[in-house]
Amino acid sequence: MKPDSLNLHALQDKSAEALAEVFGAKQPKSLLDKFSSLGLPSKKSEAYRYFDPEALLDKTYKRLAYVPREIREGEKLEIVNGVVITAPKNLRVYYGADSQVDSEHYDPLYFLGHILSPSVIIIEIDGDREIELLHRYTQSDTLIHYRIVIKNQSNRHATIYESFESEGAQGSLVLYGYDITVAQDSTLRIIKNQTINDDAYAMIASHHVQVEKQASIILKTFDFGNTSAIQLLKVDLGEHAHIDVGHLLYLSGKAKRGSISQIIHKGEHSSSVQEAKNILEGGSRGIFDALIRVEQTAKYTKTQQNSKSILLNEGTYMVAKPQLEIYIDELEASHGATTGQLDKKQLFYLQSRGISQQEAKKMLIIAFAKTLIERVKDTRHQEMIQESFERAFYGKRIDG
Amino acid sequence: MTLEIKDLHAKIGDKEILKGLNLILEEGKVHAIMGPNGAGKSTLSKAIVGHYDVEVTQGDILYKNKSIIDMEAEERALEGIFLSFQHPVEIPGVNNAYFLRTALNAKRKHEGKEELNAAEFLRAMKGHLEALGMKSDMISRSLNEGFSGGEKKRNEILQMLILEPKVIILDEIDSGLDIDALRAVSEGINKMKDGKRSFLVITHYSRILDYIEPDYIHVLKEGKVVKTAGIELVEHLEEHGYDTIVEDAGL
């Protein structure tokens, strides 16, 4: 194997010892063991069975030399091809050794990400603040990998607005993810707005979030476009901890995209709300494979999970799998999923007022999406997400 | 005449509901349709506006002497046919004002007029909202979402006032209304009585007819109009019910 290239498929079925030869003897054995035991994802893997990762993994990618650069001051925190370029004033951003690995993560590529990126980007958020985080990709046919550790302070409330840009990154695979600790009594919001069109790049994002006592995390992901990408999330909730997750998916073309998640209630009185809205057209496949596990230690948990999908034409396919795994009796839990076409009664009502069928369909689809978009509190970002959605949506024709 | 229904047979699913219905709506007149449950009153209104539930199997509906049977619902609306729904649907996420303006602009475009921008539209709306006793925040909310029964019906009448249709079908507009709402809705309807529009008022109760004073009462029974008379028929119906009408028609 050339040092400046990597075919991930070549890592299949390798023992920890063999992996150490590939990645170097300094790699923590625990990481190599985990990756080796979980194995490279395939269609047969539990987590990836609806995503078909083989085509992405069975390819030789260029590798970049990850040399940290001096971080300039800028309005945004900007990460280009996995390297921090700018950071806002008074935000602590630095590189450091990887010390925050979740050894119980279910995703093999979570561990591979850590193996590939032993030096991680560490963001320490102090105080109440809003951060704009821009990821930019500019290299083609490249394996772009990086990991980010986020830490905040107790009793503080921060928001990260995450956006993505690319130019000339066709054929690249981005392998990135967060390890987040939400400190006691604090709130962290992450609002992700990502449109990927025309194979600009593919992405596998693998995250772990630890929510400590009486802390909350709000994760809202707005994923649009015609290109494949997947997000894998594992969340551990402590006592009185809360998570609110919202996913809006609008897919077209042949995209396979969505989220796979495990939310683990570990502490008493923890709560979770997870809502997915999916709009599919063309020959796309949406994925909402979401497990909520309530452990024996998590009495008085409250949890609700819901997925609603609209299929705009034949040939689309929605995998909606909300799942509850419960080991106690003292809890409130609900979950459900619906998949269907646009509501005929609503469509007719609009048409009966002289609105064309095509325009009525657009109004209903936008309305369906809006119910999640409107929950983004900041008006400017709400408008930006609305624009991203409409740009993705109006670029496609809805058959009358 | 504005609208002529000739020997209309229509079914919903496998069940034939309208069985040779004949009715003429005269220009500028108010026609009330009464009849027992299941007579086909709502099916008739749905057939006129081109609802997907209703399949017309025989007969015709002529509007301005042209058949509308094969026209899409939106085409019928653009031509001036309006149905106030018995149960208006809620559409979360569709802003009421945006919906109303889209509908109005679709009609203006159809008539070769310039579309209204948001400010022009809101100016045009103001008087109607006041007349109907509607709070201005009702048009900034999602369409019918969380509206009370009365608010939904007022919103239907608001649409009627804005779109200025030629044939107005009111399907149980009076159901679920308190006295104040009934008066406001009736006044909205009366505003539209200009001698050129035709009204088809479907109702179970005489209350609303006291306000809007119909020219004709039609009794619908088993999918046919079995009796047509003046307002005096309402009193007869209240006293004797529909059974005597059935006997009169010889069914």
Image (tube, helix red, strand yellow):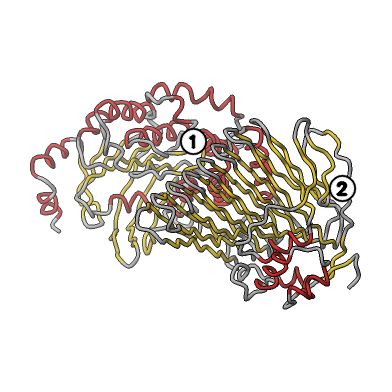
Give the residue number, with chain letter if any, for mark 1: B96
Q: Please give the label number shown on residue A212.
A: none
* Marks 1 and 2 in Cβ contact (< 8 Å): no
Name the quadrant containing residue A18.
Answer: bottom right
Q: B81 or A364, which lies in front?
A: A364
Residue A400 coordinates in the image, percent (x, y): 58, 56
Q: Is residue A342 above or below residue A54?
A: above
Q: Distance between the residues labelled 1 and 2?
A: 52 Å
Left or right of B27, for residue B176: left
Q: In this view, does B114 lie above or below A137?
A: above
For marks 1 and 2, give the one nearer the viewer: 2
Give the residue number, with chain letter if any, for mark 2: A68
Q: Is mark 1 on a helix, strand or loop?
A: helix
Q: B229 or B69, which lies in front?
A: B69
Residue B84 coordinates in the image, percent (x, y): 38, 41
Label 1 resides on the chain identified as B
Name the quadrant containing residue A280.
Answer: bottom right
The type of residue carrying mark 1 is: Asn
The type of residue carrying mark 2 is: Pro
**Mark 1 surroundings: few (<14), some (14-19) or many (≥20) residues within 10 A:** many
Q: Which residue sits at x=68%, y=39%?
A: A384
Q: A154 or A112, which lies in front?
A: A154
Q: What element carries label 2?
A: loop
Q: A57 or A292, which lies in front?
A: A292
